[in-house]
Image: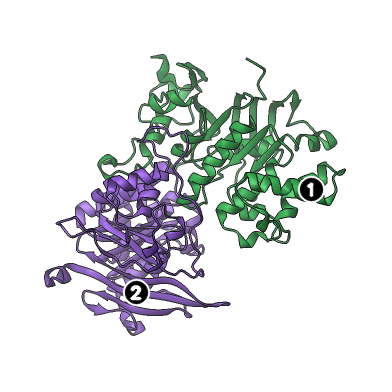
Chain colours: A purple, B green
């Protein structure tokens, strides 16, 4: 492992496992996830409900609920965050690592004005005066393209549209100028034109500040507009991790290929039927032996009873693409199985 | 061409204000036809009125206008006549688990329409027909005695579809049927609806915010904004050569899973759509990148444009 890359990583997650005690024993939400976030990059994380993508963000932020069992390691600039004292985490949260939640209406306090909520973190973390924090809040509302910021700061969450509330959440996350922005389905609840607007705001922010981001979503199309690298998760594991251009053009895991082919898309000819992935995604409580995708995989093979490790995709010299599949067929073959 | 199955004329839905919230017009005069066996897509963003149209047709919300369904006005029917149309007109919703009674077994949920409308059938026959329908939507006998919470969203939507089709309706209204489903399940349900629509010569009113899904299911598409029709056209025309500025903005905003084709900037719309619409003129004018003087004075009528209809003053230039 090159030390140079270690230096570049802002966040490195190693063999992270999160489980909860359910009525019928332990329920695994994450089953050993390793990935790193490099400076200035946007890492996309994609997967369906229950795949563990939100748990990953919560584990990084130290927000897993009390009953969670965490194992492995989450390092921020080399400092271990798992098991760190609450005061250490509190000093990092909001200041260095900021999280934007999916549902802004439940993340905002309905009784407090937008301005009060925006300024709270910056006053506590940076010791800004009320007036300086207010100035900063106003400037950031401008950054996220909210008109009449002075008016908005005096309003309450219910007086704003959904798209505006989501942009307020992004502004709030930016108040302390964090190094890493974590986004949990930030555009899922939004209309398509508003989604495009929020993505444009985030792209502009990246171009201007180089802020590193982890962008979590269920929608591969959204990531195409913003991510440098994409991690595909399934049943609590990363099954493929590759530079975006490569992942979309030549996916290496049958699940990634299946997702890409089964999506109705406007840039493709109209198929009579969509090439659907059969079966259901597993639920977090389901026991899986071997590859969790095997029951739905057209290329399933005897070896799939053993868990495939995430390893470098074989025929690539660059070594920045990883796949967890025993078959790891050539991309052409993966296209054929789904069409 | 035979008479349409559904003729909607000047449909209006207005919600009364509550407390400090003012009254709001959700649908402001919408007219369209739906042919037998046709699938018509209704697209638009939140507040466009697409769900209100569906709810009005089922009398779930009060509405004005006329909606002739096989010669009967759906908006005026009462009592037994209204109940009788439920056999021929059914709906499935976005959240299938919320639409299924958690205390009933799947067999009873799917068999319930038979118990209500075919009282002559005994329990064995109901069960037999329920099973046949469950198999048609991709489930099997092992599911009959289970409860809704044991199913995933995709399976629950299959159950809701089975229940809706039990009495052999002519029209199925689908209100965002795949919006809350996982990506890998969406394709399964979209394929199922298309297959059923063809086999049973069903007419579909398919409501969705996702234009790519609508393209897969529908042969004609209606684009709504602020409770009015902006454009309605055959699929081929609407996607290849959209005429209304709003349709163009919507299509341009749909993300595409290809980094090479990702949009470089914000959508070509004025403002953020956050302001109150001003009365009079075109409802879209405050966001329209091409708005000009006439848009403020006059509501653009829906006029023929190619093989469809478009409501825009620009089309006259």
Task: Please report the residue visible at 48 percent of the width from the left and 53 percent of the height from the top.
Answer: B182
Chain letter for mark 2: A
Q: Percent x, y for residue B165?
A: 68, 40
Instruction: Tell me, yes or no, if residue A23 can be seen here.
Output: yes
In the foreground, A12 or B24: A12
**Quadrant placement of the N terminus of chain A:** bottom left
Q: Percent x, y for residue B230?
A: 49, 27
| Left or right: B149, with B249 as reference point | right
| Left or right: B81, with B313 as reference point | right
Task: Please report the residue visible at 44 percent of the width from the left and 48 percent of the height from the top.
Answer: A190
> Quick one: label 1, few (<14), some, or many (20+) residues within 10 Å?
many
In the foreground, B132 or A94: B132
Residue occupied by mark 1:
B126
- Looking at the rendered structure, the secondary structure element under dot 1 is helix
Residue occupied by mark 2:
A16
Compared to residue B247, the image places residue A79 above or below, namely below
The mark total stands at 2
- Looking at the rendered structure, the secondary structure element under dot 2 is strand
Task: Please report the residue visible at 42 percent of the width from the left and 60 percent of the height from the top.
Answer: A293
């Amino acid at each position: 492992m090159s030390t140079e890359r270690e230096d570049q990583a802002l966040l490195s997650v190693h063999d992270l496992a999160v489980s909860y005690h359910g009525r019928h024993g332990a329920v695994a939400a994450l089953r050993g996830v390793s990935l790193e976030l490099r400076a200035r990059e946007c890492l996309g994380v994609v997967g369906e409900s229950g795949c563990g993508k939100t748990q990953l963000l919560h584990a990084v932020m130290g927000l897993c609920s009390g009953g969670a069992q965490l194992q492995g390691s989450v390092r921020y600039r080399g400092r271990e965050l798992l098991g760190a004292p609450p005061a250490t985490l509190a000093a990092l949260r909001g200041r260095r690592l900021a999280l934007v939640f999916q549902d802004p209406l439940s993340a905002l306090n309905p009784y407090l004005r937008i301005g009060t909520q925006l300024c709270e973190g910056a006053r506590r973390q940076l010791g800004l005066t009320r007036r300086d924090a207010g100035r900063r809040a106003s400037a950031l509302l401008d950054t996220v393209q909210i008109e009449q910021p002075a008016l908005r700061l005096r309003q309450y969450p219910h007086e704003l549209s959904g798209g505006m509330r989501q942009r307020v959440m992004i502004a709030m996350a930016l108040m302390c100028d964090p190094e890493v922005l974590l986004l949990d389905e930030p555009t899922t609840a939004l209309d398509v034109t508003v989604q495009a607007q929020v993505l444009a705001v985030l792209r502009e922010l990246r171009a201007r500040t180089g802020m590193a981001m982890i962008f979590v979503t269920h929608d591969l199309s959204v990531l195409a507009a913003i991510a440098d690298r994409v991690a595909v998760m399934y049943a609590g594991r990363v099954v493929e991790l590759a530079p975006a251009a490569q992942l979309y053009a030549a996916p290496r895991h049958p699940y990634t290929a299946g997702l890409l082919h089964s999506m109705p898309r406007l840039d493709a000819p109209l198929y009579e039927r969509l090439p659907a992935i059969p079966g259901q995604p597993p639920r977090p409580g389901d026991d899986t032996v071997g590859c969790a995708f095997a029951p739905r995989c057209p290329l399933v093979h005897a070896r799939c009873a053993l868990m495939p490790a995430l390893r470098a995709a074989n025929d690539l010299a660059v070594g920045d693409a990883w796949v967890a599949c025993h078959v790891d067929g050539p991309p052409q073959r993966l296209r054929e199985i789904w069409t | 061409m035979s008479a349409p199955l559904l003729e909607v004329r000047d449909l209006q839905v207005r919600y009364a204000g509550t407390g400090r919230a003012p009254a709001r017009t959700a649908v402001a005069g919408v007219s369209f036809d739906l042919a037998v066996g046709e699938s018509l897509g209704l697209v638009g963003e939140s507040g466009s009125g697409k769900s209100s149209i569906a709810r009005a047709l089922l009398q779930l919300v009060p509405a004005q206008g006329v909606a002739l369904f096989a010669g009967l006005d759906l908006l005026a029917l009462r009592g037994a006549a209204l109940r009788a149309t439920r056999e021929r007109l059914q709906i499935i919703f976005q959240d299938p688990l919320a639409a299924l009674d958690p205390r009933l077994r799947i067999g009873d949920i799917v068999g319930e329409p038979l118990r209500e409308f075919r009282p002559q059938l005994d329990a064995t026959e109901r069960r037999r027909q329920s099973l046949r329908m469950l198999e048609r939507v991709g489930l099997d006998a092992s599911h009959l005695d289970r409860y809704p919470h044991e199913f995933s969203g995709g399976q629950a939507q299959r159950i809701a579809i089975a229940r809706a089709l039990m009495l052999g309706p002519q029209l199925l209204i689908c209100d965002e049927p795949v919006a809350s489903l996982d990506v890998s399940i969406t394709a399964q349900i979209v394929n199922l609806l298309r297959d059923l629509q063809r086999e049973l010569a069903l007419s579909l009113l398919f409501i969705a915010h996702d234009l790519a899904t609508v393209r897969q299911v529908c042969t004609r598409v209606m684009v709504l904004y602020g409770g009015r029709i902006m454009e309605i056209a055959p699929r081929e025309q609407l996607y290849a050569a959209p005429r209304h500025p709003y349709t163009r903005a919507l299509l341009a905003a749909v993300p595409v899973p290809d980094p090479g084709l990702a949009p470089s900037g914000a959508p070509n719309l004025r403002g953020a759509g956050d302001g109150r619409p001003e009365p009079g003129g075109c409802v879209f004018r405050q966001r329209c990148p091409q708005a000009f003087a006439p848009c403020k004075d006059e509501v653009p009528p829906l006029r023929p444009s190619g093989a469809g209809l478009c409501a825009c003053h620009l089309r006259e230039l």
